[in-house]
Image (tube, grey):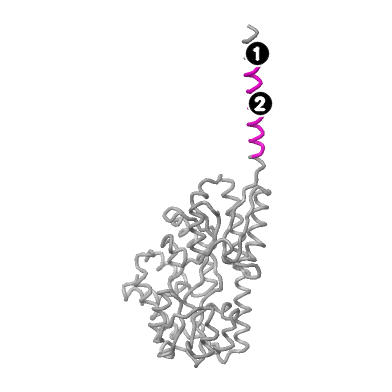
Amino acid sequence: MTNSNNTMRTIKTIKTLLAGFAMGLFTLAAVAETTLKLGTTGRLGMPIGDAIDQALMPALAKASGGKMKVEPHYQKSLCAEQKCGEQANQGLISLWTSSTANYGNFGSELAIFDLPFIFKSLEDAKRISNDWLAERQCKLALENAGHICLSVYSSGGFRQLGNATKSVRVPDDMKGLKWRTTKSPVEFMLVKNWGAVPTPYDWSQLYQGLQSGVVEGQYVASPWQEVAKLHEVAKYFTEIGGMWSGNILAMDSNQYNAMTDQQREWLHQAADAYGEKVNELDNAWIKNGEDIIKASANEWYVPTEAELTQWRAGAIGAWLDAKGTFEPDVARRVLLEQGMDSFVAQLEEAGAL
């Protein structure tokens, strides 16, 4: 009987200890802080890095009451864009920033943002993206590509033409000029269709290339032209727009789906604050860059609508090549909401829509 009582007391003691231990674990879990590691090419002092620091981090901490935080790793210190997405898939990081173009390594859901002349202005890009397009395409990305884009925004606005040789107002003016391109097949095709000679050339050498005449023109977002001081050696500019510099804040879908509804709500609140801040900073960066360029330019030319029709015609081949990566009805809606009926007609006639 005594042994039985001792056994019962021992079992009771063990249960009490286990209950206390479990309560301790529960308490630790309740107060534990969830840290989301973020990999980015952005850096402090530039729109993406500053928006992470000034909006994403404080907004998430505030919304969650300190239960969630972002741990940023700037300037490729953890990974570059595509590698960041791969690391997110492996659970090594949670969040990452990327251009919409580099997101194409994971799926075509965001390809519509990279179609040349899909947006007419920065205002149109922001309005349509915020009203419906970003939410629609990001939902598809979550379902199909293993990532959710939490925010879609610009990084540098539109690419603009700059050259060291002469005034360029219509595509024929580019004929025969050696025009620097990146590895982008879309950019290569655009430059070729506009009559120039596509010349792949390293970004780090572009200033010297323009200065020496190895290349004569470039197609880079205007604030980046100012950062690289390209306007010092290429003083003729043409504001054609065309290619919008779309970027995203993304998260691996497995990690996103593992979060509670409340955590996802906090994260979306923070991502919205980040998107607003990065757009605000980006707009100021674009204006500052263009103001500096215009102050020393020989010419900053804004084409007429009739001239823009010629520039857009050079983009039709890129749209044809991109068929299957975007939904024609969605692209048509985007263009028509901006009053770009004539471009829709051009694309339909060519069979691109």
Question: What percent of the width, then of the height, locates residue 54?
Answer: 67, 62
- Residue at the outermost top position: 1
Question: Residue at the location (51% across, 55% down)?
Answer: 88
- The residue tagged 2 is 17
Separation of marks 2 and 1 at Cα, in angstroms? 16 Å
Residue 99 is inside the magenta segment: no
Between 162 and 294, the one lying in front of the other is 162
Question: Residue at the location (67% across, 57% down)?
Answer: 58
Element marked by disc 1: helix
Answer with the quarter of the image where residue 323 lies: bottom left
What range is drawn magenta here? 8-28
The crowd level at tag 1 (other Cα within 10 Å; few <14, some 14-19, many 20+) is: few
Element marked by disc 2: helix
Answer with the quarter of the image where residue 117 lies: bottom left
Question: What percent of the width, then of the height, locates residue 234?
Answer: 54, 88
Q: Which mark is residue 140?
A: none
Q: Amino acid at mark 1?
A: Asn
Task: Tell which tag, 2 or 1, sits nearer the viewer.
Answer: 1
Q: Quadrant of the C terminus?
A: bottom left
Residue 18 is inside the magenta segment: yes
- The residue tagged 1 is 6
Question: Residue at the location (59% across, 63% down)?
Answer: 77
- Relative to 193, 120 lies left or right: right
Q: Quadrant of the N terminus?
A: top right
